[in-house]
Image (cartoon, helix red, strand yellow):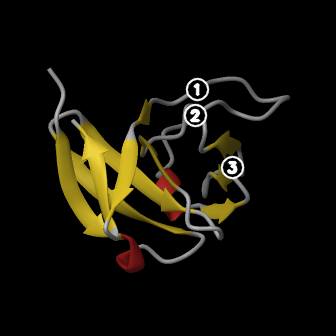
Amino acid sequence: MSSWKKIVALIDIPRLGSRVVRTEKGDIGVFRTEDDRVFALNNSCPHKGGPLSQGIVYGDKVACPLHGWKISLVDGKAEEPDEGQTSCFAVKIIDGMVYLEV
């Protein structure tokens, strides 16, 4: 059974930035693109566990701050030639508030 949890106002996530949500499953990075799309990923890079929320967001990707791996915000996959994937979580925006499926 899933439920949606209100986590933050969209305006409180900077464009091309992120926020971290602490959950029982671990930290989740919630990312906002330049065009106000929102994505949620496990906050750990599949390479060496770098905190993705501290990376640079561009387009629909985030660059890991440790070694520059490019991770898709859409599906959590590393961009070739790198290999690996991190978990994605469902998000939605209602009346300017971001909700995370837990």
Rounded to the nearest angstrom, the CA distance separating label 1 from label 2 is 5 Å
Mark 1 / mark 2, whichever is N-terminal: 2
Image coordinates of residue 99 in percent, x first then y, are: 28, 52
Vertical position of residue 48 compared to residue 67: above or below = above
**Residue 2, which numbered label?**
none
> Left or right: 69 with respect to 4?
right
> Of the residues shown, which amino acid type is indicated by label 2?
Gly
Name above or below for residue 55 compared with residue 71.
below
Task: Point out the image quarter for the N terminus.
Answer: top left
Residue at disc 2, secondary structure: loop
Rendered residue at 48%/39% (across/down): 49
- According to the image, label 3 marks what residue? 67
Question: Decide: marks 1, 2 in contact (CB < 8 A)?
Answer: yes
Above or below residue 41? Residue 78 is: above
Amino acid of disc 3 = His
Can you tell which mark lies on residue 76? 2
In-image side of 62 versus 19 (left or right): right
Q: What residue lies at 46% left-to-right and 52% top-to-bottom? A: 51
Where 91 falls versus 33 (above or below)? above
- Figure quadrant of the C terminus: top left
Counting the numbered discs, the total is: 3
In the image, residue 19 lies at what x, y percent?
38, 64
Could you say where residue 9 lies in the image, as x and y percent from the top left? 30, 72
The residue shown at (56%, 75%) is: 15
Q: Nearer the viewer, residue 79 or 74?
A: 74
Residue 78 locus on image (x, y percent): 69, 33
Q: Name the residue under label 1.
A: 85
Locate residue 3 relative to residue 34 in the image: left or right.
Answer: left
